[in-house]
Amino acid sequence: MHAKVTPQIIQSYNEVGAVRVPGAVSAQWVRDMAHEIDSIIAGLRAGTSKLGTSDYGGAVQFEDHGGYVRLVNVYRYAPTMRALVEQSDCAEIVADVIGS
């Protein structure tokens, strides 16, 4: 089991259906992810997006409503975002919490 997942966290998840895992990601990881998301949004707004291709299907959906932004399927097309998630402990933490 991942060191940041405790029996109390698992119990809370089982009781409530959601849980916060303290320290699951670092402050630097949050900054890097925020920068990546901001860069993607800026590129989509400007029409200069440098998103890659995907074999998974489902086009990127982007809605911008003056402060509210909706992004769907971006993860599949954003290699930097994928790397941030896939090289983190997120999958292991989630698996431990949900008992996968």
Image: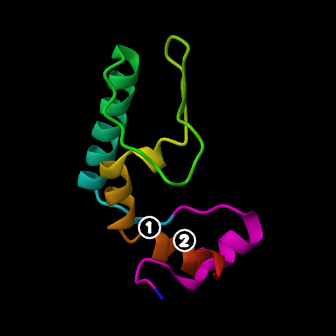
Task: Please identify the quadrant where the C terminus is shown.
Answer: bottom right
Tell me, yes or no, if residue 8 can be seen here. yes
Q: Crowding at label 2, few (<14), some or many (≥20) Cα neighbours within 10 Å?
A: some
Classify mark 2: helix, strand or loop: helix
The residues colored magenta run: 2-20
Which residue is located at x 67 percent, y 70 percent? 13
Type of amino acid under label 1:
Cys
Picture coordinates of residue 23, whole percent (x, y) = 37, 65
Residue farthest bottom in this picture: 1
In the rendered image, the vertical position of residue 98 relative to residue 22, given as above or below: below
Residue closest to the far right: 15
Q: Which residue is labeled 2 in the image?
A: 94
Please say whether residue 23 is visible from this viewpoint: no
Q: Residues within 10 Å of mark 1 (few under 14, many from 20)?
A: some
Q: Horizontally, is 18 left or right of 32 in the view? A: right
Residue at the spot x=33%, y=24% of the render?
43
Residue drawn at x 51%, y 11% is 66
- Indicate the quadrant where residue 46 lies: top left
Locate residue 4: give its quadrant: bottom left
Q: In the rendered structure, which amino acid carries the disc numbered 2?
A: Val
| Distance from the alpha carbon under mark 2 to that under mark 1 | 6 Å
Instruction: Look at the numbered discs 2 and 1 and tell me whether their residues touch, using CB distance below 8 Å.
Output: yes
Q: Is residue 5 above or below residue 54?
A: below
Determine which residue is flagged by label 1.
90
Q: For residue 99: magenta?
A: no
Percent x, y of residue 55: 50, 54
